[in-house]
Image: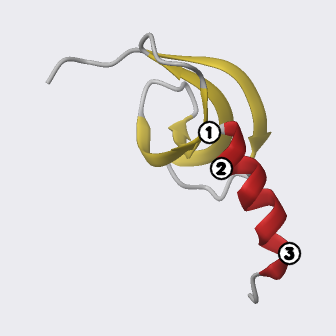
Amino acid sequence: MADVKCEILDTLLEFPDDGSKYHKELNLIQWGRNPPKYDLRGWSKDREEMTKGITLTKEELLFLRDQLPTIKL
């Protein structure tokens, strides 16, 4: 499988560092030539390595934002 290049266009949120190798970030990312999406995943401090994550369209992120208050934690 070919390497897919990604470009972080904007960092929206960095989760507090928990001392592990990776910290989570919510970024607006462009994967290859695809339209930018919102991306939540772990990144190493130098951003050379990343964990598995999820990507969301703007509509999906807004839906998640609106539904979070209804989730019983």
Query: What's the amino acid at mark 1?
Result: Thr
Q: How is the image coloured?
A: secondary structure
Q: Which mark is residue 57?
A: 1
Q: Is residue 58 above or below residue 6?
A: below
Mark 1–mark 3 Cα distance, whole angstroms, equals 20 Å
Q: Is residue 2 left or right of residue 72?
A: left
Whichever of callouts 2 and 3 sits on the residue coming sooner in the sequence is 2
Q: How many marks?
A: 3
| Mark 1 surroundings within 10 Å by alpha-carbon count, few (fewer than 14), some (14 through 19), many (20 or more) | some
> Which quadrant holds residue 36?
top right
Mark nearer the viewer, 1 or 3 = 1
Residue 47: numbered disc? none
Q: Position of residue 7 (x, y in %)?
A: 55, 15
Label 3 Cα neighbours within 10 Å, binned few <14 / some 14-19 / many ≥20:
few
> What is the secondary structure assignment of the residue under circle 1?
loop
Instruction: Find residue 29 and report its horizontal and vertical position in percent.
Output: 59, 25
Residue 37, image x and y in percent? Answer: 60, 31
Cα separation between marks 2 and 1: 5 Å
Tell me, for residue 69, which label it has, or none.
3
Q: Residue furthest top?
A: 33
User: Which residue occupies the foreground of this view, 37 or 6?
Assistant: 37
Q: Residue at x 62, y 39 (%)?
A: 57
- Quadrant placement of the N terminus: top left
Q: CA distance from mark 2 to mark 3?
A: 15 Å
Tag 2 residue: 60
Assess whether mark 1 and mark 2 are in contact (beta carbons under 8 angstroms).
Answer: yes
Kind of residue at badge 2: Glu
- Residue 54 higher or lower than 34, as above or below: below
Query: What residue occupies the far left of the structure in this picture?
Result: 1
Q: Position of residue 42 (x, y in %)?
A: 53, 45
Q: Secondary structure at mark 2?
A: helix
